[in-house]
Amino acid sequence: MTNNELSFEDFKKEVIADYRLAVLSRKLSLHGRREVLNGRAKFGILGDGKEVAQIALAKTFQKGDWRSGYYRDQTMMLAVGLLTPKEFFAQLYGTTNLKENPTHGGRLMNNHFGSRNLDKDGNPTDHMAQRNSVTDISPTAGQMPRSLGLSYASKLYRNNKDIQHKTTYSNKGNEVTFTTIGDSSTSEGHFWETLNAAGVLQVPLAVSIWDDGYGISVPKKLQTIKGSISETLQGFEKTNDKSGFLIYKAKGWDYPTLCKIYAEGVKKCREEHVPVLFHIEDMTQPQGHSTSGSHERYKNKERLEWEKEFDPIEKMKAWMLEKNIFTEEQADKLDKEVEEEVKQAKKVAYEESQAPILKAKETFLSLFNNIKNPLPIIQEQAEYIRTKKQISRGDVATALSMTIRYFLPSEESQKEIRKGMIVYLKELNNKGKQYFNTNLYSESKKNPLNFPSVPKKYAEGAKTKPGREILRNNFDKLFEKYPELVTFGEDTGFIGGVNQSLQGLQEKYGDLRVTDTGIREATIIGQGIGLAIRGLKPIAEIQYFDYLMYGLQTISDDLATLFYRTVGGQAAPLIIRTRGHRLEGVWHSGSFLSMVVNSIRGVYVCVPRNMTQAAGFYNTLLQGDNPALVIEPLNAYRKHEREPENLGEFMTPVGIPEILEEGEDITIVTYGACVAVAQEAVKQLYDFDISAELIDVQTLLPFDTHGIIKKSIKKTGKVLFLDEDVPYGTTAYMMTKVLEEQCAAKYLKTDARMLSAKAHRPAYGSDGDFFSKPNTIHVFNAAYEVMHTYAPELYPKLYEEK
């Protein structure tokens, strides 16, 4: 099917191999469901009914190409060599050994596929020497935004000669990104936003829509206007005089046609950089949505009979028999051979998954057998571990903890046994941490935490200038330094950003590097994720912090989890640039840091107080491999600052607060736009003989890795946590990090205090700001109140009516 010059015998071999692969994938699905129902696996989501189309797609998938798909793609992954039958079962069993479960080491549910694109030291592999797949996430359509960036990278590599030396990432942009999605998930906004952006940008993106007529139980007539996504998308279709998508439509059981359209469509996609969409209808789902239910609940008898008749494997088999490609006897023999292959893979995978757990079970029982006259509750723990059919490491750790708790011997020999149990419990917990609690952030040498601070250098008599100019001049140095640096966003290009911090840079570096986009925050983030994965240095700009919420799901579910869900096998060191805190009104004064900090763990969150500090963060982060969000303070672009002479070189450290004012009486901890407010309050406090130590935390993730705030509290004995988030939001986060995690509470001489904005959104105008957010008078009053509580005779109430 891939070469018009094939002999009939070679043609037969290829078709039979394809059929064998389809049968293999189907049997994996059937056995996978049984493994869940018999209790050996916890949950199963499978790819049955989608086999034939994925085989046709896989024929066009070349080394260097990328997949951004979802959990139905097991046949495709088998076909391109990124999945083996044994690995299929290892995912079902949650095997934690990366050699046996290389995609995610048991951190994700089954059928979440990917490739390993970093070595054990965090260095990139040669993407062009392998077929590549971003490791899947479960949220429907969540794979779409990043697919834009993966395909856009090919456009940049083709059109920017200055980066074509990066030959381990691209062969002059010849790579196609294949994204797959279920028909019902096309109802999601991410799908439409991605297709619109891909059509505008004209990138080599091949979108396959697997249409089996349902979204779990909901039929597509309730999902999609006209009941057909390809008909709905006719306005997106490329015409002779207008760009758009090439749209192909075929049946999921029509093997010859599927091979033909994929060969033709992907060839055009690769060569012409035109996006292509394949709507594959009449697919089936023989076992329903997942192992948690049965499709007999919502499909009528006629539909179920139709699915049997139009099963893609049965239809392919009938076509092969009609064309004399094989006989019934040969088909039966093939079926039996594949059945044995699947059984053997299942057996080996299960044994490998159970081996470390059985070892833990044996170790526990061995320790238990040395206990003299165990209490009944201890005997219960041992009996549970001995007799439970399917045990886990957690079961063993729980039994061991309970045994240690109630095993309190007086004999020395028995005390040694108890010590041995404690040692083994620590070993179990350490292994659990290794398997499940590592790689939230980069653990390589390129993590920005490992970089030394490079201080700012100022020329003698250096004049001040608006902060936006310092930031722009620093970006200019960075664009000179890094040919792979690109930035894009709303109004980012032609006018140089709404605050002019990129003014003139598009004209200097071109619109491929400093680029305007549509109003589409989710795919601006996705564009950055894909570019970062493919070896570029993207800065994705979200115009205002308030608008970040449009892209927060993509940051939280995709970007923030990438290191973790791949156990350090993939990275996307994207920098997201935005601006926030105080300006005007409800939607241009956002500072909802607690929502962000608690939803994007895995991404560093930098909150600079001015543009020089922000520039230093970009200088630091661009050298590292961890994604980050930088929130510039909106009211600082026009404030004058001294410009360092080592632009592009000085580095603001992550995780290290800066003491801006030293003091003895009270510690004030804040960040971002509140720093300037606090600085004025510190001056006013000095008039009342209160010496305040002001600390700018600089980054919320990571937070004070050196314990600087704790040392300050040890000195002052009093603390005020200040910001403009909602009450008990980020101030509570900071307080917890310092008082609980750093154990600084023991140094307090009076209660800690928090000061934040009001619970409602910030109101418009100067008065709206004054009565919504902390201002200098509020900070002074809060700090003074702390001092009054500590020493009322020295600091009497100032506003008490007498």
Image (cartoon, rainbow, N blue to C red):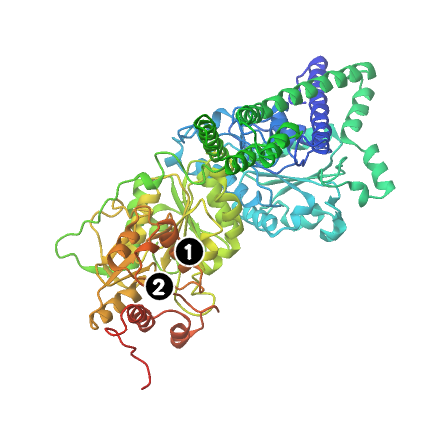
Residue 372 shows up from this direction: yes
Report x, y in % for residue 315: 80, 28
SS for callout 2: loop
- Label 2 neighbour load within 10 Å: few <14, some 14-19, many 20+: some
Q: Going by the picture, which residue comes out furthest to the left?
A: 460
Q: Residue 67: where, in percent of width, then height?
A: 56, 34
Tag 2 near tag 1, CB within 8 Å: no
Q: Quadrant of the C terminus?
A: bottom left
> For the residue carrying disc 1, how many other residues have a C-alpha within 10 Å: few (<14), some (14-19), or many (20+)?
some
Determine the secondary structure under disc 1.
Answer: helix
Residue in the picture at 30% in, 42% down: 480
Label number found at residue 733: 1
Q: Which mark is residue 181?
A: none
Q: Residue 385 in the image: x percent, y percent? A: 61, 30
Q: Is residue 671 left or right of residue 150?
A: left
Q: Earlier in the sequence, mark 2 or mark 1?
A: 1
Q: Quadrant of the N terminus?
A: top right
Three-letter code for the amino acid on which mark 1 is drawn: Tyr
| Numbered circle sitting on residue 751 | 2
- Residue that extends furthest to the front in the rendered view of this protein: 410
Rendered image quadrant of residue 634: bottom left
Instruction: Choose mark 2 or mark 1, whichever is in front.
Output: 2
Q: Is residue 267 above or below residue 488?
A: above
Give left or right: position of 407 versus 655. right
